[in-house]
Image (tube, rainbow, N blue to C red):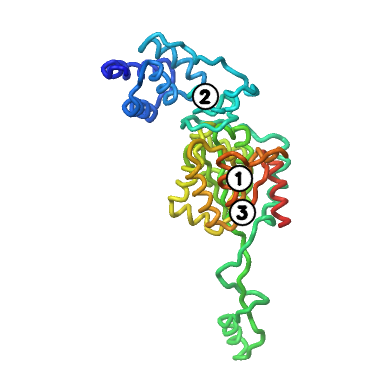
Amino acid sequence: MIERSLVSDHVHGFLRDLREHSLHVPVAKQRIFLRAIEAVGPRDLTHLYWIGASTLTHSREDLEVYSPVFARWFGGLPARPARDEESPDDESPAARGTGDETPFAAALGGQAGLEAGSAERERRPVFGPASPDDRAVLPLLRRELRDAMPTVRSRRRRPARRGPWIDLARICRESWRGHGEIVTLRRRNRPRRQRRVLLLIDVSGSMKQHSAGYLRFAHAVVGCLDRAEVFTFGTRLTRVTGPLRARDVDAAVGSLSEVVLDAEGGTRIGPSLQQFLGNARYVTMARGALVIVLSDGLERGDCGPMRAAVRRLSLLGHRLLWWTPLACDPAYRPITRGMSAVLGDVDALAGVRDLRTAYEQVQTLAKE
């Protein structure tokens, strides 16, 4: 066990030196690092090295700054992780995220963002402009959305040509103009209106290839439907309905870089959905709504919170749809722990990876 005096004497100078070497270490991360040292009690310098790497860095570039600074303050540890950098397409156990990778790589979910991770990152993502194909699909999607969304009878009665209720107030007003004669029997009815639509979009590292397309789909939904709400989640929950109301799709999605600070980071599906359900105002948005979750469902750790949250969402909403890019592969089977746990509470599982496939699913909804 490292002597506490060694850590106490060096840790603050070490953190200051990291900032001087242009490594962004906000106060929140410093607190997590200090609490981890206090709670875990590093066994040796290597253990301390990885505690700092997992709490103070969020990329290999950060690790290249972190390692020599750590070696200078605490000892002669290697300046880079022991494992050589591997390509995203490598089929080794480390590339697949099966547990053989370093703790740092496991937390980040891989350099390419192809695996689920648990680390919380504070970095502003950059969502590029829509491609020409996306801009060609958007008008088609907007035209299809209104007819595709499910409807429900309004609770309020309104004047109508036909209906089960007689409109006495309107009949009396017209009879005054006709000297007490009732010329036409007026009626009232409960018209149909669109159900609320709730989108829950996964922006974690494993979804970074698809997040921008999902957000453009959300922009079309918010622009076309009067009762639509959009939330993103990675390691935290963020409501993004307001920014998505901007008229231009690139301006709307681009503005989310100032709002969504957990994009391309870790994955905490269960805790994020439970945070949504813990807010009474948000629960009202889900009640009777068409709920669409756009996520690969790759949850790390205990899947119990995810299973409980999805079950409650299914009970609250009209329908619960789960759209995942993995299901675009015909060979896909929902056999991961998270997806197999929630599959019984999902009304439909479909493959959506971009605007084009989202448009195809909306067309499917219109036929139901």
The answer to which of 302 and 184 lies nearer the viewer is 302
Q: Residues within 10 Å of mark 1 (few under 14, many from 20)?
A: many
Cα–Cα gap, marks 1 and 3: 10 Å
Mark 3 lies on a secondary structure that is: loop
Q: Residues within 10 Å of mark 2 (few under 14, many from 20)?
A: many
| For residue 316, above or below residue 16 | below
Q: Amino acid at mark 3?
A: Leu
Q: Position of residue 193 (x, y in %)?
A: 62, 63
Q: What is the quadrant of the N terminus in the image?
A: top left
Mark 1 lies on a secondary structure that is: helix
The answer to which of 175 and 98 lies nearer the viewer is 98
Seen at 58% across and 33% down, the residue is 206
Mark 1 or mark 3, earlier in chain = 1
Q: Is residue 252 visible?
A: no
Considering every residue shown, the one lying at the far left of the view is 5
Mark 2 lies on a secondary structure that is: helix
The answer to which of 274 and 30 lies nearer the viewer is 274
| For residue 274, above or below residue 186 | above
Q: Which residue is mark 2?
A: 105
Q: Which residue is mark 3?
A: 225
Q: Which residue is mark 1?
A: 218
| For residue 271, above or below residue 314 | above
